[in-house]
Image: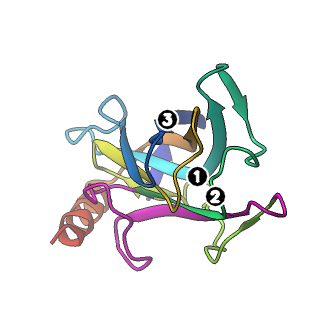
Amino acid sequence: MATSKTGSFWLTERLDGGTAAAGNTAGTIDLGAYVDVGDQQALAIEQVDFILQAYDTANDVYNSALQGAASGDTTWDFQLTDLNPGGAIVSADTQSLIASAVLMFDDSNNTSSIGPDLFPDIFGKLDEARMVVNDQLYFVMDASTAPVANFQWRATIRVKARVVKLSTKDWMAIAIQSTAADN
């Protein structure tokens, strides 16, 4: 199906969640340098990691211990898609969904746990990787509560990928599937 043009590399993007409100924050990862229609060049996604940190805006300090930053019990949803969801969290059966995660934080007990999204976002090498032919990836974080004063939610996504060349048939099949998922 695919032949590697590069070895594996990491794409990283950070979202800065609001300091005064709960809700969705969205961002993009530009793939224009990796995807090429004329050469049937795609991005093979092998693994996706989501990282959440509390950022103390008053002291310019990052902290992975969320106690003191959360205004109570909080849940964060994270998703990566290859079609624009308009900043919203999409259903788990959406074709454009590449990876997702849920983190739940119990503020009174200072414990965090992975939520009901238990599916690992490790796809594997070429024959198992998630092929993307779109020129953007869309990253969404949804926080159920706002952070306390002087804090901000910061989510980082790390995407392990490689550039691949697809056969014309395979490239077209993925492009058609991606377009159909948009409708």
Residue for point 64% across, 19% down: 60
Residue 82 image offset from top left, x and y in percent? 34, 55
Front of the two marks 3 and 2: 3
Alpha carbon distance from label 1 to label 2:
5 Å
**Quarter of the N terminus within the rendering:** bottom left
Classed neighbour count for the residue bearing mark 1: other residues with Cα under 10 Å, few (<14), some (14–19), many (≥20): many
Q: Can you name the residue that lies furthest to the left here?
A: 183
Q: Residue at x 32, y 61 (%)?
A: 170
User: Tag 2, which secondary structure?
Assistant: loop
Report which residue position mark 2 lands on: 124
Q: Which residue is mark 3?
A: 13
Residue 40 placed where, x, y %? 28, 45
Question: Height in image: 94 above or below 64?
Answer: below
Q: Which residue is disc 1 drawn over?
A: 46
| Mark 3: amino acid | Glu
- Which quadrant is the C terminus positioned in? bottom left
Foreground tag (1 vs 3): 3
In the displayed structure, would residue 35 be above or below residue 23?
above
